[in-house]
């Protein structure tokens, strides 16, 4: 009989993981509390956007390798891939691990000796230990289980490829758990699988994303300084990166997503007196979206005086990064919302979603025709097509994500 894998949470990580695992000699049980998502998956369709995923899910479901449920089923390995959002109303954002602990409680009556339980959700240090405590409180024989932590390291838009190709860090509550969990990942991961303890693995994920957040904060801070001094920041960074030991990332309207915009706070919350640099990076990236809004408002007010009315603002992109449909923690969405709350009519262009509760979505042609001021917030592929980019440049679009940047550095692109 094929090994049974139960994946709790069928979102941006859990569903691609289920589809990848179904290609191996494994029986996949997908679990999600979203009834509509469960029904959609069991029809061989998907409720999120990720290139190549729908065909894989359709194949997995039709072959009988993947079936989705609203409640967990008995398995040999359990993977927890549920959200870890913030608790609302705290001065320093605090991780909410309620979904993780609820997932652990839900499988407690099902687990048996020798089962492997792996937490993949990005979590504060010590969360894997809390999972074990919750299982024990619910009556599970924790000493007979292999409990581990293995954070995902994937890039939206390339999740399928990176689930298998990227190196993985597997941290167990003991060496046997680390080894058992690592053996599971070696079934489908072609990258290196490295064993360590759970706390180190938890901190490793937070450290990786905090490093990227700090690098982006440096780029975003440079962009604001360069704007004041009349320097093209993308040209500057391209030139600086010609140094053999310099690799500055690209600025944008802020930082979004459920990793880089979130994970640094988990470190800050655990040691606020020891993390001023990490906290400052977060604050710089959060402030960038407000700076963008002020730049737009200044241009809009000047244009209003010419038009004799408030201009219509066309926002190109709502997702948190190019070529995905994920709006979580998106600075582009925050900017569009802020402009709408200030009374501007916002025309939104987001090619990767079909509807949004707050905005009427338009195509590029409509937005160019109907808008008075054009704001490039996300560098989606359709916006980078030569003809579209030319029209946006001719319309005097404000570029906040480097769509008009010269990739090689040297002469700055025309304004």
Image (cartoon, rainbow, N blue to C red):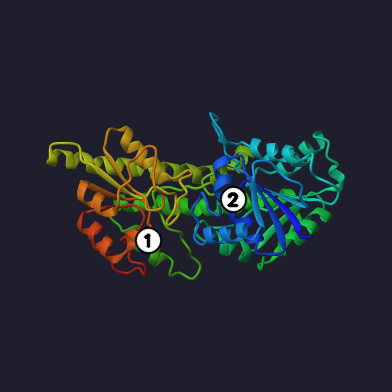
Q: Quadrant of the C terminus?
A: bottom left
Query: Which is nearer the eye, 398 or 103?
Result: 103
- Whether residue 415 appears in this view of the structure is no
Q: Is residue 381 left or right of residue 25?
A: left
Decide: is 240 above or below 281: below
Mark number displayed over residue 381: 1
> Residue 278: which disc?
none
Q: Residue at x 61, y 39 (%)?
A: 33
For the residue pair 272 and 320, the one nearer the viewer reads as 320
How crowded pointer 1 is (Cα within 10 Å; few <14, some 14-19, many 20+) is rated as: few
Residues at discs 2 and 1 in contact (Cβ within 8 Å): no
Residue 274, quarter of picture:
top right
Residue at left offset 74%, top offset 55%: 4
In x, y percent, where is residue 220? 41, 51
Left or right relative to 397: residue 94: right
Seen in the picture, residue 382 relative to 136 is either above or below; the reply is below
Residue under pointer 2: 42
Q: Quadrant of the N terminus?
A: bottom right
Residue in the picture at 35% in, 41% down = 336
Outermost residue to the top:
89
Q: Nearer the viewer, residue 274 or 313?
A: 313
């Amino acid at each position: 009989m094929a090994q049974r894998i139960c994946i709790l949470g069928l979102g941006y990580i859990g569903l691609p993981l289920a589809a990848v695992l179904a290609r191996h000699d494994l029986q996949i049980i997908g679990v999600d509390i979203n009834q509509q998502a469960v029904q959609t998956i069991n029809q061989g369709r998907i409720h999120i956007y990720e290139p190549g995923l729908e065909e894989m899910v359709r194949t997995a479901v039709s072959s009988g390798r993947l079936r989705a449920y609203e409640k967990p089923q008995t398995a040999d390995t359990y993977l927890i891939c549920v959200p870890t959002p913030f608790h609302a109303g705290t001065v320093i954002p605090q991780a909410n691990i309620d979904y993780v602990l609820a997932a652990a409680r839900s499988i407690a009556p099902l687990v048996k000796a020798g089962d492997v339980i792996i937490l993949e959700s990005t979590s504060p240090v010590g969360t894997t230990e809390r999972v074990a405590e919750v299982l024990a409180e619910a009556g599970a024989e924790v000493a007979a289980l292999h409990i581990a932590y293995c954070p995902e390291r994937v890039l939206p838009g390339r999740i399928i490829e990176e689930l298998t190709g990227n190196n993985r860090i597997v941290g167990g509550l003991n060496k046997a758990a680390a080894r058992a969990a690592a053996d599971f990942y070696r079934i489908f991961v072609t990258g290196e699988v490295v064993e360590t303890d759970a706390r180190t693995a938890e901190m490793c994920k937070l450290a990786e994303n905090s490093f990227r957040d700090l690098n982006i904060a440096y780029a975003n801070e440079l962009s604001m300084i360069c704007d004041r001094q009349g320097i093209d920041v993308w040209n500057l960074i391209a030139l600086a990166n010609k140094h053999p030991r310099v690799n500055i990332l690209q600025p944008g309207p802020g930082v979004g997503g459920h990793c880089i915009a979130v994970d640094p706070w988990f470190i800050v919350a655990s040691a606020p007196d020891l993390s001023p640099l990490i906290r400052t990076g977060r604050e710089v990236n959060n402030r960038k979206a407000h700076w963008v809004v002020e730049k737009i408002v200044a241009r809009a007010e000047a244009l209003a005086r010419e038009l004799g009315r408030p201009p219509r603002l066309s926002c190109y992109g709502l997702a948190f990064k190019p070529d995905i449909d994920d709006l979580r923690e998106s600075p582009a969405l925050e900017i569009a919302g802020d402009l709408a709350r200030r009374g501007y009519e916002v025309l939104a262009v987001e090619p990767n979603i079909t509807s949004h509760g707050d905005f009427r979505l338009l195509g590029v042609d409509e937005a160019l025709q109907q808008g008075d001021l054009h704001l490039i917030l996300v560098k989606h592929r359709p916006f980078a097509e030569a003809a579209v980019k030319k029209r946006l440049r001719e319309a005097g679009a404000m570029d906040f994500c480097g769509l008009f940047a010269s990739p090689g550095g040297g002469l700055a692109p025309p304004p």
